[in-house]
Image (spheres, rainbow, N blue to C red):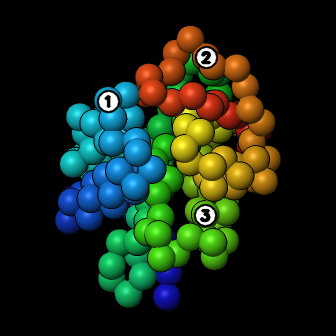
Amino acid sequence: MLVYREIRESDNAAIASLIRRILKAYSLDIPGTAYYDEGLDRFSELYGRPDARYYVLEDEGKVVGGIGFSAFEMIEGAAELQKLYLDESYTGSGIGYEMIEYVEARMKDAGFKKSYLETHDNLAAAIHIYIKSGYEEIERPSFVGHSSMNRFFIKEL
């Protein structure tokens, strides 16, 4: 049974490993991506604030995915949807859509009105999910968090 919960310190290694494995599989183990984020191995510390949360998805005690958000000051009333990753064995099941709905509800609960995200052409399946979830593509902003990202989206919550 799949369960969402806030990340714990004991999840840090599992989620960092999942993210690195997926980025490497899509040739995104390069500078300017989450692969090299300084805080990737300590998400539980970074996302423990009311304006920043990270949720893991676990299946029978094993971390199989994660998704988070953080306040995004560059766009008024926005949070950035961050680090949506799902173990490859669960892709194609519709869980990605559920994960987005889940985190958007948490964003709304935290008072955010918009969701912003950055992604890359190599992640075509993720882009498909974002578009089907109501995200609209925008021009590259001047304030990009990950320099190698080349696709940008926003959604009214």
Q: Nearer the viewer, residue 44 or 133?
A: 133
Is residue 143 visible to the viewer in this orientation of the structure? yes
Helix, strand or loop at mark 3:
helix
Q: Which residue is mark 1?
A: 31
Q: Which residue is mark 2?
A: 141
Question: How far from the left and from the top, in percent, is residue 22?
Answer: 40, 56
Question: How far from the left and from the top, in percent, is residue 136?
Answer: 77, 36
Q: Which residue is mark 3?
A: 96
- Name the residue rendered at 63%, 49% in the picture: 124
Q: Is residue 92 above or below residue 157?
A: below
* Contact, mark 2 vs mark 1 (Cβ under 8 Å): no
**Foreground label between 3 and 1:** 1
Q: Nearer the viewer, residue 93 or 47?
A: 93
Is residue 5 visible to the viewer in this orientation of the structure? no
**Residues under labels 3 and 1: Cα distance?**
25 Å
Local crowd size for mark 3, using a 10 Å CA cut-off: few (<14), some (14–19), many (≥20): many
**Residues under labels 2 and 3: Cα distance?**
25 Å
Helix, strand or loop at mark 1:
loop
Q: Where is residue 113, by image quadrant?
A: top right
Q: Is residue 27 left or right of residue 98?
A: left
Helix, strand or loop at mark 2:
loop
Q: Where is residue 11, by image quadrant?
A: bottom left
Question: How far from the left and from the top, in percent, is residue 12?
Answer: 24, 57
